[in-house]
Amino acid sequence: ALATFDSALASCPKESLQIYYYIGIFHARDGKFAKAAEYYNRILSAQPENVDVMFNLAGAYERSGQFEKAEKLFLRLLKIDPDNPMALNYLGYMYADRGVNLNKAEKMIKKALKYIPDNGAYLDSYAWVMYKKGKYKDALKYQLKALDNSNDDPILHEHLGDIYFARSEEHTS
């Protein structure tokens, strides 16, 4: 695949930014997030307000443990496109998973759900915020709804187990 990309870059130099985008996606899917970030950054230097590239770059930063860089880029993206449900959900979930900015995370994910109310990932994110806030009854409600809408993601089942465990601990205390 990389040889094909190299060939495309040589034969279609005017399309290099689009090719860089796909090379970035290729590396990200291969778990090479630093390499993906290199290509996304090349595009952003030419197109500093490209929200699709910002989203993918922020995701690459987050997946490589560079949370501050990811947060900064998601916030920049949301200044350009404040109603971007994917960015709202991703950053909100990032906050929830780390147990920080939970009120902000809740608002962001609620806003994402306003645009796509039956998205299983967004419902899971909202459930995770409720879980992190200790609101286990609400967390369970949203997690079950998430599973009704997206049953193929093992993380959703893991979160459901965490919520059930927290509820059982709550009742034995």
Image: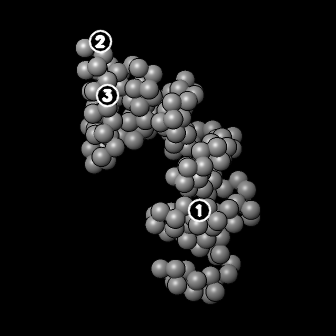
Report crowding for label 2: few under 14, some 14 to 19, many 20 or more residues within 10 A (C-alpha): few
Labels 1, 2: front one = 2
Circle 1: element type: helix
The percent position of residue 46, horizontal first and vertical second, equals 74, 64
State the residue in front, 69 or 19: 69
Q: Residue at label 2?
A: 173
The percent position of residue 87, horizontal first and vertical second, equals 55, 43
Between the residue at mark 2 and the residue at mark 3, the CA separation in whole angstroms equals 15 Å
State the residue in front, 42 or 163: 163
Tell me the amino acid under the disc marked 1: Ala
State the residue in front, 88 or 118: 88
Q: Residue at label 3?
A: 163
Circle 2: element type: loop
Q: Residue at position x 53%, y 26% from top?
A: 102
Question: In this image, 74 relative to 3: left or right?
Answer: right
Report crowding for label 1: few under 14, some 14 to 19, many 20 or more residues within 10 A (C-alpha): some
Check contact, mark 2 vs mark 3: CB within 8 A: no
